[in-house]
Image (spheres, rainbow, N blue to C red):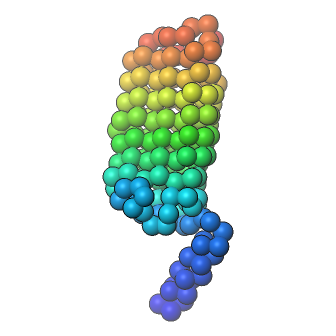
Amino acid sequence: MKKLLTLIFLSSSLAARAYWTPIDVSIFSPAELPPCNDAVYGLRVNVPYGRTSSMYGIDAGCAQHVRGSAGGIECGGCNFVTGRFAGIQVAFGSNFAVKELDGLQVGFYNCCRGESNGLQVGLVNWTYDMSGFQIGLVNFIWNSPLVCFPIVNAPF
């Protein structure tokens, strides 16, 4: 038990000096521990909403907001990444990757305003440029000869 407490103390003191943290718990931003300016490399739990500068690991809760880049697994009601996202986003509602998506988005509405490299599966899928496939009721790839197509769409 002493070794575990020592390890937790050392990791938290290193995290404070390096401006990153292995664990983030948020009730509603800015009511979160540690503050939302710290990057998270590990586990982040948001009930109902959390915001951080960057996230690498597992991000779970009702609504996640990452102001920079993120990677790993995001699972919740709404996932929003302002920068580049690499990994898997699963949402009961919407997934957003503003700059670039490398991986998989599964949700009611999936959106990438930049380039999508991978797969989007949902009722409505929207991206500017695509290297991969979209599976859904309505699929948009704006930088493609076939901009909108139902069921399956890819940059032909």
Name the spot of residue 9 as percent of width and height, x first: 55, 83
Residue at the extreme front of the image, as rendered: 30
- Quadrant hosting residue 129: top right
Q: Nearer the viewer, residue 69 or 120?
A: 69
Left or right: 132, with 96 as reference point: right
Left or right: 118, with 105 as reference point: right
Name the spot of residue 17 as percent of width and height, x first: 65, 73
The residue sitting at 62% across, 15% down in the picture is 143
Name the spot of residue 59 as percent of width and height, x first: 47, 53
Name the spot of residue 51 as percent of width and height, x first: 47, 52
The residue sitting at 61% across, 28% down in the picture is 114
Residue at the extreme top of the image, as rendered: 145
The residue sitting at 64% across, 25% down in the picture is 131
Q: Is residue 141 visible?
A: yes
- Quadrant hosting residue 137: top left
Q: Nearer the viewer, residue 126 or 34?
A: 34
Q: How many marks?
A: 0
State whether residue 115 is above or below residue 10: above
Quarter of the rendering occupied by the C terminus: top right
- Quadrant hosting residue 128: top right
The residue sitting at 45% across, 67% down in the picture is 33
Q: Is residue 11 visible?
A: no
State whether residue 153 is above or below residue 81: above
